[in-house]
Image (tube, rainbow, N blue to C red):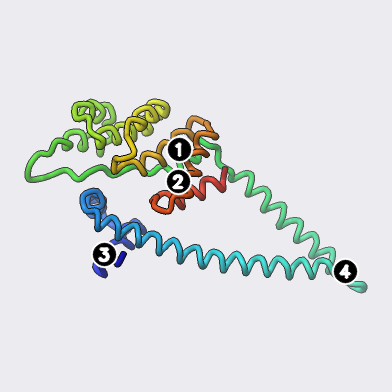
Amino acid sequence: MNIEEKNIALFENYLSHEMDKKSMLEFEAQLIYDSDFKNQFETFKSIETGIKEHYANELKQKFSELDLELDKKLSIKPKNNKVIWLSTAVAASIILGVFIYHHFSNQLTMPQLAQENWVQDEGLPVKMSSKGKYDDAMNAYKLENWDVALTEFDKIKTDTAIYYSGLIYFEKKEFQISLNVLNEIGKNSIYYDDVQFRKALNYLALEKKKEALDILSIIGKNKESAYREKAKKILELL
C-alpha cells in the first residue's frame, strides 16, 4: 500500500511520542474510524521495523567479526611477553563478569515485564460540540477515576466499553478479572489484536508463563499484528 506523503511526518511524530496529547488522541481516533489511514500506518511501521532490523543485523555482524578477531588474538600466547597476554586474559574475564552480572541483575520478573510493556490507552476523544455516549465514561477513564468509569462503561455494553473495562481492571491490578472481561471480545472485533497482546500481559502479571507464551508465540508469527515485534522481544526475554 502507498503511504500518502502528508501522513509520513504524522506517523513519525506519533511513534517518537512528539505529539501533544490532543493530537495523539485525534490520531488514535482516526486509526479506529479510518481503515485506509490505519492500513497506511501499519505499512509505515512494517517498513520502519525492516530498516531497524537491517541495521541491527549489520551491527550484530560487526560484533561477530570483532569477537572472532579477539578469539584469534587470545589463542596466540606470546613467548616473550607473558605480561601482555595475561593482562588481556584478565581484561576479557572482567568484561565477561560484568556482562554476566548485568544480564542477571537486570532480568525482569514476569509481573515486571508485564508492567513495562503495558501502555495505557489514551481513550477515545471526547466531543466538545455534542455529548457522545462514551463521553462520561471516557472523562472518568482519562482522569483515572476507575470505579466511575467502570460503572459508566457497564451501561453501554459494546466492544469498546468491554475493552476499556478490561484495561481498567489491569490498571487496578485485578489481572484475573481483566482477563475474564477481555475474553468477552471475539475475533471479529476491531480490538481483537490489542486484546490478545493485553491478555498475554495479564498472564505474565499472574505468572502464568505457559499461557502467556502460547499467545505471544501466535502474535509473533502474525505478520498482520501491530504487536508482532513487541511479542518477539518479550519471547526472547522469557
Residue 118 sits in quarter: top left
Instruction: Please indicate whether residue 168 sits to the left or right of residue 232 in the image.
Output: left
Q: Residue at x 63, y 48 (%)?
A: 103
Q: Is residue 211 above or below residue 190?
A: above
Q: Which residue is mark 1?
A: 200
Q: Which residue is mark 2?
A: 219
Q: Residues within 10 Å of mark 4 (few under 14, many from 20)?
A: few
Q: Amino acid at mark 3?
A: Asn
The picture places residue 162, in percent across and down from the top left corner, at: 28, 32
Q: Earlier in the sequence, mark 2 or mark 1?
A: 1
Circles 1 and 4 in contact, beta carbons < 8 Å: no
Instruction: Please indicate whether residue 125 sits to the left or right of residue 60 in the image.
Output: left
Q: Is residue 197 above or below residue 77?
A: above
Q: Amino acid at mark 2?
A: Ile
The picture places residue 148, in percent across and down from the top left corner, at: 23, 27
Residue 90 sits in quarter: bottom right
Numbered tag placed on residue 7 in the rendering: 3
Q: Residues within 10 Å of mark 2 (few under 14, many from 20)?
A: many
**Where's the C terminus, which quadrant?**
top right
Residue pushed farthest bottom?
80
Residue pushed farthest left?
129
Nearest-to-viewer mark from 4 and 2: 2
Q: Residues within 10 Å of mark 1 (few under 14, many from 20)?
A: many
Q: Earlier in the sequence, mark 1 or mark 3?
A: 3
Q: Residue at x 37, y 27 (%)?
A: 180
Between 171 and 143, the one lying in front of the other is: 171
Q: Earlier in the sequence, mark 3 or mark 2?
A: 3
**Where's the N terminus, which quadrant?**
bottom left
Q: Is residue 75 above or below residue 42?
A: below
Q: Tell me the SS state at disc 4.
A: loop
Q: Which residue is mark 4?
A: 77
